Image: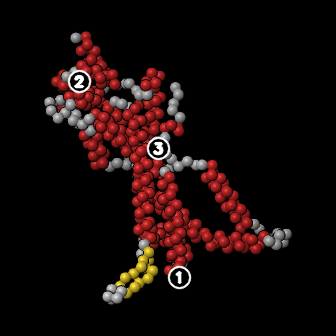
Amino acid sequence: MAVTPPDEMMFGRRTKITRGMKIGAALSLLLLAALITIIVFPITATTPAWVEPLQTNVYGFMARISPYILVGLLGSTVAIAELVSTFQTYPREALRTRWAWILIAVNVVAAMIALVVVRVTMTEMNPSLQILSVGVGFQAIIRTRFVLAKRIGGDGEEGEVALNLGWLYDQFQNLARTQIDLELMNNRRTAVTRLLDYYPSMAELYDIAWYTITARATLTREQEDQRKADLEKLLDPKAPENFAKSSIALMILENGGQAYVELLLTQAMQNLSPEAMAMGKPSSADKLLWELIENYSLPEMVTLAEKLCTSDKAVTYVRDAAQPDPQANTANQKATIAHFLVQQIGLEPLQKALAERGRE
């Protein structure tokens, strides 16, 4: 069976590697190789006279710019670490956005500017220490308020003219992070929509979400219990079914990540029949759910739960969910209970119960 190509499984836009970017990278590598060749080229008696002065000039040029290159590399590392810590659930997706690359470039330039400031103001500091301190702490240096001039007014009050690069830097960082978050939000919506297309049953979504939380190795016991409790709250019969399903799908994405969602979608498409593939969604539990909703009243669902459920807690939940409530839609109540029964009891016992009811 044909599977959707990998490119179609990716969510949101990513930074595309254009032809110009490839040419620029190739030229940069060629220039770097030429510089290294010139620097390490051995000087012998047969070497042309112009090679040695060229080698000396290139070596001196590289010695002057290498501190800025090192500081830029450290600055980019700091920027990447900040992005990863800010978007912990989607670190790879965040780093693929255009604004992430812009933010990293701005950090590189800011680190180089900070090195210039340190070299001008702290001339006695060891050059290696300058590079290390600026590469790691350039943000604090950029946020330093530089007083350019002071004036004394006619009333004796002092004033000053200052340059505040830190404010500009902070404003740009906030803008970049906001734009990255908005792009990721679009990605999240795309992922949730596709999950709902291939897993339209609340029972399937609930099972996947429960497993996803349980399978996480980095969650503490308290975090796992809290997320499971949040998942249980989404089965509230007063909540609209579409809202509950979207929230569960988002919970799967938040706990598993986009790579995990892509795996789920690939598995779902592999398990689809040709008819279901043409429809764009699976039909495993949908028919059973509709039969439960159409053929059973709320009291009959309670009776069915008492007959088939092995857990008293599950029966109590169904009884509470079936209580008449003028604020809740009866169809939503029945749909919530039907999804819960499928999750708690399974498809086969419910199908047998429906078959026995049909024979009666």
Quarter of image, res 252: top left
Residue farthest toward the front in the current orientation of the protein = 154
Q: Tell me the kind of residue under disc 2.
A: Leu
On the image, the x and y values in percent for residue 186 come to: 42, 45
Please give the residue where the numbered disc 3 appears in the rendered image: 12
In the displayed orientation, state which residue is furthest to the top.
Answer: 359
Is 32 in front, or is 177? 177
Q: Are marks 3 and 1 in contact (CB under 8 Å)?
A: no
Q: Residue at left 34%, top 42%?
A: 251
Q: Quick one: 235 or 348, which is closer to the camera? A: 235
Query: Residue flagged by tag 1: what amino acid is it?
Result: Glu
| Residue at 67%, 61% in the rendered image | 32
Q: Nearer the viewer, mark 2 or mark 1?
A: 1
What residue would you read off at disc 2? 308
Which badge, 2 or 3, comes first in the chain's sequence? 3
Q: Out of 158 and 247, give the one closest to the viewer.
A: 158
Quote the CA–CA distance across marks 2 and 1. Answer: 82 Å
Q: Residue at x 84, y 72 (%)?
A: 45
The mark closer to the camera, 2 or 3, is 3
Residue 111, given in percent of the width and then of the height, sits at 51, 68
Residue 84 to residue 67: above or below: above
Crowd band around label 3 with a 10 angstrom C-alpha radius: few (<14), some (14–19), many (20+) = some
Regarding mark 3 in the picture, which secondary structure is present there? loop
2 and 1 marks in contact (CB < 8 Å): no
- Label 2 residue SS: helix
Q: Are marks 2 and 3 in contact (CB under 8 Å)?
A: no
Q: Looking at the picture, which amino acid does disc 3 mark?
A: Gly
Task: Decide if residue 350 is in sight here.
Answer: no
Around disc 1, counting alpha carbons within 10 Å, would you say few (fewer than 14), some (14 to 19), or many (20 or more)?
few
Toward which corner of the image does residue 334 lie, by quadrant?
A: top left
